[in-house]
Image (cartoon, coloured by chain):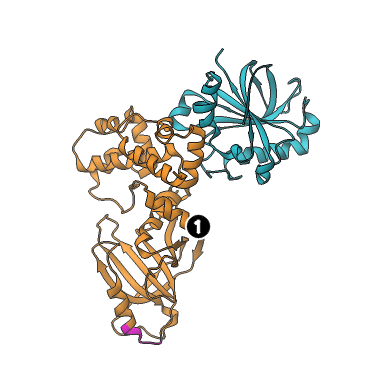
Chain colours: A orange, B cyan
């Protein structure tokens, strides 16, 4: 079996043992690698060290348990193999920016706070996009003009917005086209999606479209390679791998996609477009 | 792979070390991971100062050794050291650390070409040592690089020796 499949198997092993006292050596044994080669290979393919990944997954599931059950915090900590409340609180705060008791009191949280389990699909997609080359850059304020729709979640079909934009613009518009997704900061699943062009491309706002000012911000952008159905895997890289290892946090729950001349997300195996998420310094 | 077992004398080494998960920033064989960066720092120091300041006994031979602790099994963190064998530690520059590799009975495996970048540690534990009827001490191991090692970019032409300390 190739390394990708072996490491995917290790990810499944981790997932099945989040509540058991496993360490990196057990993960390595599960796929018949030496500890040294396992650490080297796991980090190369997942972009996390095995221990860091284990800790982040345990914190994510512990956080979920705090919201979904009334178990005592110490019991949740022990269930996820944190042997004292101090260690648990410190790790929890480092990953989620709040203490366990604070987290429990919040009814909802920003989307994409909890690290999802990585899968074989992630590893294959990340190989397709490798090497990720995130670019952090400031961008002055700009205005988008477009058609906005509410979607029940960000994976929902957004083609209605593109049809609407195309009708409003007529045949003359050639882009570049953008998709702006804005989630609710309280963690609700529904999102606003704007299919848009830059305001400077149009002399006036056509009837039926809206104007959306985007403030001056720092953004990180990467290229997504592959079909639209794998776009969530690119977002997982940005939010759960790049962001925690950077000195930034997400400025607001949303992202901007740049499609070039395509009207919306292209959906071919060889498709490429850019996605950018807005940033704040982690210290602010 | 060639294998021998032999008694080795203690070796006094001088060099640089790192503790942690060396693949935290970059996995694989990237020169950007902490092992690559350690070699880079050591190489630059050796060229600029070490070759003249240190009392090296075999200037053309470099060592990389790994020291494992109980937490290594849990977290994957361990110590990596790169350096040269020296005759004495008197006047050792502040930025250089000394390590004493203990005298012991070692299994010595000579790796060639692609073997060097394979999971040879698994082979050592699960195939090669059992074939020799030997049991390793789990606390450390080291690699000895001499003129036979041509560099990662010429791995097919390269050889290196891996030393595994054995339980007596």
- Residue at 40% of width from left, 41% of height from top? A53
Is A170 within the magenta?
Answer: yes
Please provide percent x and percent y for residue A94: 39, 41
Position of A50 relative to A164 (above/below): above
Q: Which residue is mark 1?
A: A134
Please provide percent x and percent y for residue B97: 67, 27
- Residue at 41% of width from left, 57% of height from top? A234
Q: Is residue B94 visible?
A: no
Q: Quadrant of residue A56?
A: top left
Residue farthest to the left, as pictured: A70
- In the rendered view of the protein, which quadrant contains the N terminus of chain B? top right
Residue farthest to the front, as pictured: B131
Residue farthest to the top, as pictured: B168
Disc 1: CA contacts within 10 A as few (<14), some (14-19) or many (>=20): some
- In the rendered view of the protein, which quadrant contains the C terminus of chain B? top right
In this picture, residue B25 sits left or right of residue A263: right
Question: Which residues, given as a range, are shown in magenta?
Answer: A167-172
Please provide percent x and percent y for residue A84: 33, 27
- Residue at 76% of width from left, 38% of height from top? B47
Is A215 within the magenta?
Answer: no
């Amino acid at each position: 079996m190739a390394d990708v499949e072996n490491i995917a198997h290790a990810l499944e092993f981790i997932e099945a043992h989040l509540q058991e006292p496993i360490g990196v050596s057990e993960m390595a044994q599960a796929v018949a690698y030496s500890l040294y080669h396992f650490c080297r290979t796991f980090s190369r393919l997942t972009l996390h060290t095995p221990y860091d990944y284990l800790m982040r997954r345990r914190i994510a599931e512990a956080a979920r348990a705090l919201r979904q059950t009334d178990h005592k915090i110490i019991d949740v900590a022990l269930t996820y193999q944190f042997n004292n409340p101090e260690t648990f609180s410190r790790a929890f705060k480092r990953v989620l920016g709040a203490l366990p008791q604070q987290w429990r009191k919040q009814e909802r949280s920003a989307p994409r706070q909890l690290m999802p389990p990585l899968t074989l699909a992630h590893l294959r997609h990340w190989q397709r996009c490798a090497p990720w080359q995130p670019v952090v850059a400031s961008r002055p304020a700009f205005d988008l003009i477009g058609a906005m729709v509410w979607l029940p979640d960000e994976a929902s079909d957004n083609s209605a917005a593109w049809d609407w934009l195309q009708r409003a613009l007529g045949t003359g518009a050639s882009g570049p086209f953008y998709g702006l997704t804005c989630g609710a900061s309280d963690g609700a699943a529904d999102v606003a999606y704007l299919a848009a062009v830059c305001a400077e491309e149009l002399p006036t706002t056509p009837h039926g479209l809206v104007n959306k000012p985007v403030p001056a911000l720092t953004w990180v952008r990467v290229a997504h390679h592959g079909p639209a159905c794998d776009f969530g895997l690119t977002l997982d890289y940005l939010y759960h791998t790049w962001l925690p290892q950077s000195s930034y946090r997400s400025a607001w729950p949303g992202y901007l996609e740049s499609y070039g001349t395509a009207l919306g997300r292209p959906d071919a195996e060889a498709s490429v477009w850019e996605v950018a998420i807005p940033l704040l310094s982690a210290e602010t | 792979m060639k294998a021998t077992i032999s008694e080795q004398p203690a070796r006094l080494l001088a060099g640089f070390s790192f503790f942690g998960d060396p693949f935290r920033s970059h996995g694989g064989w990237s020169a950007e991971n902490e092992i690559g960066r350690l070699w880079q720092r050591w190489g630059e120091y050796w060229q600029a100062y070490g070759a003249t300041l240190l009392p090296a006994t075999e200037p053309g031979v470099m060592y990389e050794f790994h020291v494992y602790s109980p937490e290594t099994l849990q977290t994957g963190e361990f110590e990596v050291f790169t350096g040269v064998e020296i005759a004495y530690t008197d006047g050792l520059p502040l930025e250089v650390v000394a390590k004493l590799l203990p005298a012991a009975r070692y299994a010595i495996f000579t790796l060639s070409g692609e073997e060097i970048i394979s999971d040879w540690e698994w082979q050592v534990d699960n195939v090669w040592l059992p074939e020799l009827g030997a049991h390793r001490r789990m606390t450390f191991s080291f690699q000895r690089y001499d003129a036979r090692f041509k560099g990662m970019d010429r791995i097919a032409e390269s050889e290196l020796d891996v030393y595994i300390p054995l339980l007596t």
